[in-house]
Image (tube, rainbow, N blue to C red):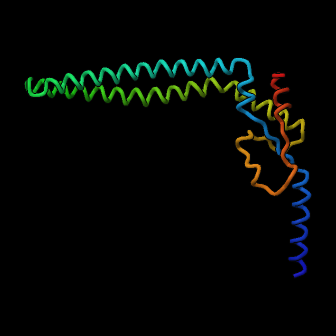
Amino acid sequence: MRNTIFTVIFVLLTTSVFAQNKKVGYYNGDSLLRLMPGYEACLDSTRMYHDSMRVELERMEKDKTIRQREMDSLQGKVSPLITKLQAEQLRQVKDNIEQYKRLSSAEIQTLDSLRKAPFEQRLLDAKNAAAKKNNCTAAYDKKAINFNATPIENIYLDLNAEVAEELKLK
């Protein structure tokens, strides 16, 4: 019984001492990325590519609508063989549209990731350097932290200025 009480007291004391020495840094990743030279151009480039793919998809949809109307207007006026061929062509157009949607979405995500990767790596390196300089045990993007989740106060440290300094933004 005594050992159990002693163990509980020891754990409580060591945990509170550890919690007092623990610092977690946070930063606003989105705003810091947007301050980095070239990042907005990277986003604009991806947006322009996305817009060009959207225009192509709209062209394909318009072509499908025209073919559908043409097929509907000729219904009963042409032979069943022609109707069957038109239906097959329309099905192929629909399949092409669905395939284009899937491939273009995957391509845009991949392209976006590849273009952002160097900026995100610079941010990660700067975040790690700022955390180390401020003796933080960890550093997280602000959107990943629930500040109300812990009863321990004064463990969070704002690293925005230090990360920006590491990135040479100011």
Q: Nearer the viewer, residue 109 or 71?
A: 71
Q: Residue at x 89, y 35 (%)?
A: 133
Task: Please give the count of numbered marks on the rendered protein.
Answer: 0
98 lies left or right of 133: left
- Residue 19, image x, y percentages: 87, 55
Check the image and report above or below for 127 versus 156. above
Please tell me which residue is depicted at 50% across the width and 26% down the height of the picture. Answer: 107
What residue is rendered at 87% in x and 82% in y?
A: 1
Residue 105 place in picture, x, y as percent: 48, 29
Quarter location, residue 33:
top right
Query: Residue 156: x and y, percent?
Result: 84, 46
Query: Left or right of 119: which side holds 126?
Result: right
Residue reaching furthest bottom? 1
11 vs 46, left or right, is right
Location of the C terminus (image quadrant): top right
The residue closer to the viewer here, 39 or 21, is 39
